Image: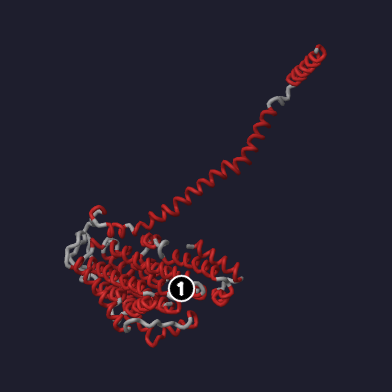
Amino acid sequence: GDLGMALAIMLMFAQLGTTDIAAVNASIGSASTSVATAMGLLLLLGACGKSAQVPLQSWLLDAMEGPTPVSALIHAATMVTAGVYLVVRSNGVFDASETARTAVVVVGLVTLLVGAWIGCAKDDIKKALAGSTMSQIGYMMLAAGLGPAGYAFAIFHLITHGFFKANMFLGAGSVMHAMDDDVDMRHYGALRASLPITFATFALGYLAIIGFPGFSGFFSKDKIIEAAFGYNVWVGLGTLLGAGVTAFYMTRLMMMTFFGEKRWRDEVHPHESPLVMTIPLMVLGAASLLGGALLAGDWIVDWLEPVVGHTEHHELAIPALAMSAIIVAVVAVGATLAYLTYGRRSIADVAPLDAQVRWPVRAGRHELYGNEINEALVVRPVQHTTRTLVFLDGKGIDGFVTGLADRLGEASQALRKPQTGLVRSYALGIFAGATIVLLALLAVTLA
């Protein structure tokens, strides 16, 4: 990802003579389409690395080993969404290349579905939320790829997502605090009574992320889905499927954590977190509910217009109200399926083995084998190439230079041996040399 970003910057300077993003957007028209495409794809590569988009997504779930406040601030609300900002801010480059924009849409669509898939299979509460973050940023990235029809909505969802996802990550930290730092949701259950504030604020974030009417996520995600249908019906269906799966895995998380029977160990005594932890939850919970107000009167769209241009509106085949009703219905189906699967049945406190579950669950547990794929396609080939180059350098270039020096050193050592400093040795050498010369002269004379 960083390599792609560096190459994009170099290409900007080489072709346009500047790396100032406003100047690049203004002057990209002077470059050829192929240059704009290369620049856009390299910027997308940098965005994928920064925002955990396929195929550079594996690091985000590994980062969940860090402190939970870091996950809330950096891995949900700020740094991890920087790739989306990069694409939107570089709108001139992507507007100049339809190929680059299409690539952004494809990456966003694949990532939102892959992240949702992973979220359905994880029992670690933070990793389930990390899969959710991948998926939601996929929505933002897809919206950014829609061009003028989606730039403003990508940033709108970035803002609302920062509210409700930071809320839920901090809520997960509150749950972990109550459960002696246990992250396995199979060891939770029935925590709503022990953690009433955490439950209430987490529920606000849950309703926002699934797109419950009136909550912030309802407004921002619905706008992206509508814009996606205006772009292409198959892309729209993909975003609609993602909304249903989002409702499924988030309801699963709620059922496993706050409902059902208690499954924690006897030595664990769940308790509500102190005010220093719950006050931020209340603030973020309120923002999760009220964040949609940014769309009132198209304020967010008008505010971003000087940067992203006028937001285009495609005519939908059905009224916007009907589209919203369809989205809510799909969300309801996803939530209902999760409730029937995890809310009405007992949950084992030990996860079944990989051999005991179906391949979709197994693949989701292993994050669709992202680490293994990167290892096979990138890490190992690079390691083999590096070892080969080191060998060739050591035995070839360095080998020739150091080998020549070694041979000269050996020759020098050999020539030094006769130089003993003893007169008798030199006299013997002179005598032997003179004898050889006399014998040679005698042989020539007799011949």
Q: Position of residue 373 (x, y in %)?
A: 39, 55
How dense is the environment of label 1, judged by Cα within 10 Å: few (below 14), some, or many (20 and up)?
Answer: many
Residue 286, visible in the rendered structure: no
The residue wearing badge 1 is 85
Horizontal arrangement in the rendering, residue 310 relative to residue 9 (left or right) = left
Q: Residue at x 37, y 86 (%)?
A: 296
Tell me if residue 118 comes above or below residue 281 in the rendering.
Answer: above
- 263 up-or-down from 283: above or below: above
Residue 194 % position (x, y): 22, 69
Total count of labels: 1
Q: Is residue 77 left or right of residue 245?
A: right
Where's the C terminus, which quadrant? top right
Q: Closer to the camera, 130 or 36? A: 36
Which color scheme is applied? secondary structure
Quarter-of-image position of residue 439? top right
Identity of the residue furthest to the bottom in this view: 297
Rendered location of residue 235, percent (x, y) = 36, 72
**Callout 1 amino acid:** Tyr
For the residue pair 436 and 30, the one nearer the viewer reads as 30
State the image coordinates of residue 323 (x, y, percent, origin top left): 31, 80
Query: Which residue is at 34% across, 72% downward?
Result: 239
| Outermost top residue | 446
* Relative vertical location of residue 313 with respect to residue 37 in this rendering, above or below: below
Would residue 298 be visible to someone looking at this image?
Answer: yes
Q: Quadrant of residue 371?
A: bottom left
Q: In the rendered view, does 129 fall on the left or right side of 7?
A: left
Say which element carries label 1. Answer: helix
Q: Nearer the viewer, residue 195 or 447?
A: 447
Q: Quadrant of residue 134?
A: bottom left
